[in-house]
Image: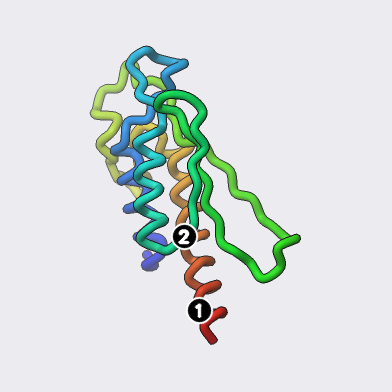
Amino acid sequence: MSSISTQTVELLKQLIKIESINPSASAKGSGEQKVAEFLEAFCRERNLPFEYQEVTDGRANFFTWVPGQEPDKRVLFISHMDTVPVDNWEADPFSPDERDGRIYGRGSCDDKGPLAAMLMALSTLGTVSHDTRLS
């Protein structure tokens, strides 16, 4: 597995560990604020700009981007940070389990897996973008 693939899997596992159940779907749900805080740390470590958009208590939108050389051309990645409730799980839904090349845990494919992939893509683009500007 390549370094970027390994980093993406590790990022996914970290995201799965964060309970982010939609409070509209379960009274026990905390919302996605803790995921947004995790993403803030991720972006700070990589010098990526970011912004919060408070929606309501415990519910926030999170934005990050890589400045390009042509501001009129953009690519948008969009994902959500909340999950549905964890009723009837036999194992700990927030303990990522890797089996047969797959990752299991709440949100692993809807939508924390795609979120991890998007973040790693932006992080990689950000590194290339910074390197290009320095030369």
Mark before the other along the chain sequence, 2 or 1:
2
The amino acid type of the residue labelled 1 equals Asp
Quadrant of the frame with the C terminus: bottom right
The residue sitting at 45% across, 44% down in the picture is 113
Cα distance between the residues tagged 2 and 1 = 14 Å
Q: What number is the disc on residue 48? A: 2
Residue 81: which numbered mark, if any? Answer: none
According to the picture, the residue beneath numbered tag 1 turns out to be: 131
Give the residue at x 64% y 50%.
76
Residue 102: x and y, percent? 37, 45
Q: Along the line of sight, which residue is nearer the eye, 26 or 103?
A: 26
The x and y percentages for residue 4 are: 41, 64
Q: Secondary structure at mark 1?
A: helix
Q: Residue furthest top?
A: 27
Q: Position of residue 7 (x, y in %)?
A: 36, 59
Callout 2 touching callout 1 (CB < 8 Å): no
